[in-house]
Image (spheres, helix red, strand yellow):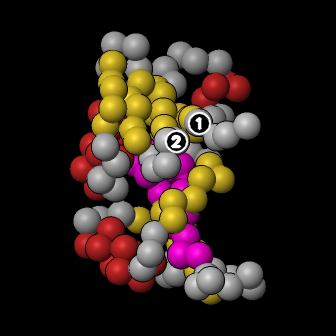
Amino acid sequence: MELNTVRLFVRDLAAARAFYADVLDLPLQAANAELGYCVFAAGRGVTLVVERVEAQAEPEEQALVGRFSGLSFAVPDLEARYQALQARGVVFSGAPELQAWGGRLATLLDPAGNALQLVQLPAA
């Protein structure tokens, strides 16, 4: 079994597309504004699907937007990526922090308020 696809939910698909493609530099693989989705290459065969939640959607669907996603993007130099993304206007909840397991994490927010993490794994 292998992880293939992860999904995030947003209200403003155009803002999300610009953020993931132009700010985070994830390659856009497919998009359909009418159907409300964008697909990005997220590394090692994993795709990130960003889906629009309509304003008239049920409360259960609305609750999918703007929450901690549990998604972490591995980066080789967290401090450098943190500085570069801050310069692009990305909002972080705090500076990179050393974790008890030896890695470093920084949490950022996308335009919909979804929390994502950048992680620098400990040296082998």
What residue do we see at 67% from left, 40% from top? 2
User: Which x, y percent locates residue 52?
Assistant: 46, 26
Instruction: Determine whether label 1 and label 2 are within 8 Å by CB.
Output: yes
Mark sitting on residue 46:
2
User: Which x, y percent locates residue 85?
Assistant: 33, 68
13 shown above or below 111: above
Q: Which residues are magenta?
A: 109-121
Which of the pair 71/57 is nearer the observer? 71
Q: Does residue 37 appear to the left or right of 61 in the view shown?
A: left
Q: Which residue is mark 1?
A: 4
Which amino acid type is shown beneath numbered disc 2? Answer: Val
Q: Earlier in the sequence, mark 1 or mark 2?
A: 1
Which of the pair 102/24 is nearer the observer? 102
Q: Does residue 122 appear to the left or right of 94 in the view shown?
A: right
Mark 2 element type: loop
Q: Does residue 1 appear to the left or right of 81 in the view shown?
A: right
Which amino acid type is shown beneath numbered disc 1? Answer: Asn
